Image (cartoon, grey):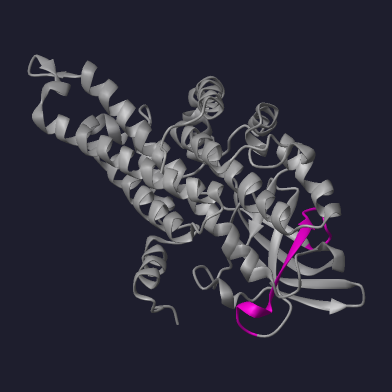
Amino acid sequence: MDLSLTEDQLAFQSLTREFLDREVVPHRTEWDRAESVDTAIIAKMGELGIMGLTIPEEYGGVGMDTMTYALAMEELGRADSSVRGIVSVSNGLCGKSILAYGTEEQKQRWLTPIAQGTAVGCFGLTEPDNGSDAGNLRTRARREGDDFVIDGSKVFITNGTWADVCLLFARTGGEGHRGISAFLVPTDTPGFERREIKGKLGLRGQATSELTFTGMRVPADAMLGEEGQGFKIAMSTLDKGRISVAAGCVGIVRACLEETVAYAQQRTQFGRPIAGFQMVQDIIAEISVDADAARLLVWRAADLVDRGEPFGVAASKAKLFASEAAVRSANLAIQAFGGYGFIDEYPVQKFMRDARVMTLYEGTSQIQKLLIGRHETGISAFL
């Protein structure tokens, strides 16, 4: 694998970092306290091309490759994971699904506004009783003439209260994953209700919501892909989504490293900077190694996507390692900061809170281990 980056990739990475240092980093503490980012940032990211990174130019995007996308997600994770989640779900989970499975009419209707940041998408899969067991979701869509009528609920939906379109997964057939279909539902559809979830440990600036559907009627042409193809759409999209999460976690690790080094160089104890203490250097070294190791796993997965080769297991490995590394690094950073790391005057406590959920969503660490284990043994541990 050639690990060198192209000039275009490096240029977009630099452009993204400069933009985020100017438009996001100065506000992340304020947004975290307010439990909401300033949504004007979405349109600004659209103008820069971040909201349409992997969407082709013909649909209003910039048509970048997966490696460039991963680089941008790392920069977003470094700046504010709440903002990264907005992009990952709208452009990634929602936009990429429409691009891969949508009709031309669906692509024309949704991809351009998503890419330009004038519309936001959400991914309606997780339910109150079904998280990892997504194949047994209960939201049901029954056919009535030329329409489907949908009843059910979703929970922990990123962008849910901001979204203009929901990629919604519902049961149209029998039990199990083969009975699931996907729909593109405008969020102003009668019967579509949403409630924002407050009081989260981390990702406070990101809108996380509970969605409820009561007698919600959508036309049959709102279906994305073929009937019964919903589970396949969800799982194939989540494979790529794990690369985005992993890249964002690399950004968290990087941020922990940068903040810890800067603090250790200026903080003095016993008449000298604590950067000169062996145990502080041990902390910094551990974070530094995790940053490089996680990044290489992400780059390998992204490279496989761009080469058109199987990447699912590589994405699971990257997501597993990088998310756990983000938690480790944030914990170590707080230790280096001491009592100051425990207050939100410094960002390392936010890194810890944001990192913790990365081991949970888009497939928990335990699910990633089962996927990796199945690949290595040829035996599934799933029921």
How far across and down, in percent of the image, does residue 327 sit? Answer: 33, 47
Q: Which residues are magenta?
A: 175-191
Res. 266 in view: yes
Q: Residue at x 43, y 43 (%)?
A: 299
Q: What is the tally of numbered marks visible in this picture?
A: 0
Q: Quadrant of residue 189?
A: bottom right
Question: Which residue is at the front of the view, 57 or 290?
Answer: 57
| Residue 62 x %, y % | 68, 34
Does the stretch in magenta take in 176?
Answer: yes
Query: Residue 260: x, y in percent?
Result: 27, 28
At horizontal 58% and vertical 35% (from top left) the residue drawn is 37
Quarter of the image for residue 19 reads top right
**Drawn side of residue 158 relative to residue 320, left or right:** right
Q: Is residue 52 magenta?
A: no
Q: Position of residue 249 (x, y in %)?
A: 41, 43
The residue sitting at 69% across, 32% down in the picture is 46
